[in-house]
Image: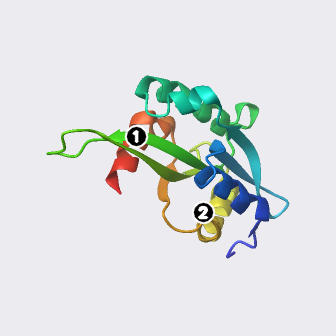
Amino acid sequence: MASGVSVAAEVVTALQDLKIRHKYKYVIYHIAGGEVRNQALDNINSEDKNNEYNTEYQKQRHQGFVEELKGGEQANTCRYAVYDFSILDQKEGDTAARKTNKILFIVWCPDTASVKDKMLYASSKDAVKKALGSGITEVQATDLSELSFDYFWEKAQSK
């Protein structure tokens, strides 16, 4: 809490719902009133479950995530997100691809954000990561190329 920003209990609850109960595909957080809070929760539906490892379907779902993270009218605002990224991972020498999910912690600080906003999110990041716990891969993004499906794929496979 170096920035004086605290993490609301709802943040941890939403992560548990995403990670353990598979209730959400992603959760987007923002800082409001000196606290990190949930901003958007994306529920998983039956179509998502049927297409969890369908790469083309996941790319379409990912595009919706990117649009929501960018924030429309608030496009120049930093945000955090946790994303349940589903991949088929085939290591060299494996005969079949392995289904796996990686939980990604995204720190979205666009180049166009104010310096004050960037500093607030950078100085609060460790408190958020600590509240979220271990087993999460961090992705720092400052432009749209770092929010691409392929970039997330690389990050998900790297750890």
Q: Residue 95: image x %, image y %?
A: 18, 39
Q: In this picture, is 128 found above or below 150?
A: below
SS class, disc 2: helix
Badge 1 amino acid: Ile
SS class, disc 1: strand
Give the class, few, some or many, for how many residues have Cα within 10 Å of label 2's Cα (few <14, many ≥20).
some
Q: Does residue 48 show up?
A: yes
**Residue visible at 76% across and 51% down in the picture:** 38
Q: Residue 28: image x %, image y %?
A: 68, 46
Q: Which quadrant of the view contains residue 105? A: bottom right
Q: Residue 94: image x %, image y %?
A: 19, 44
Left/right of residue 1 with respect to residue 101 in the rendered view: right
Please identify the residue farthest to the bottom as the structure is shown. 2
Q: Nearer the viewer, residue 131 or 123?
A: 131
Q: Does residue 8 show up?
A: no
Residue 61 - label: none
Q: In this picture, is 47 found above or below 115?
A: above
Which numbered disc, 2 or 1, marks the residue that appears first in the sequence? Answer: 1
Quadrant position of the C terminus in the picture:
bottom left
**Residue visible at 61% across and 42% down in the picture:** 112
**Residue visible at 49% across and 30% down in the picture:** 58
Badge 2 amino acid: Ala
**Residue visible at 67% across and 76% down in the picture:** 2
Q: Which of 112 and 106 is in front in this view?
A: 106
Give the labeled residue for mark 2. 122
Q: Do the residues labelled 2 and 1 touch (CB within 8 Å)?
A: no
Residue 87 - label: 1
Give the class, few, some or many, for how many residues have Cα within 10 Å of label 1's Cα (few <14, many ≥20).
many
Q: Nearer the viewer, mark 2 or mark 1?
A: 1
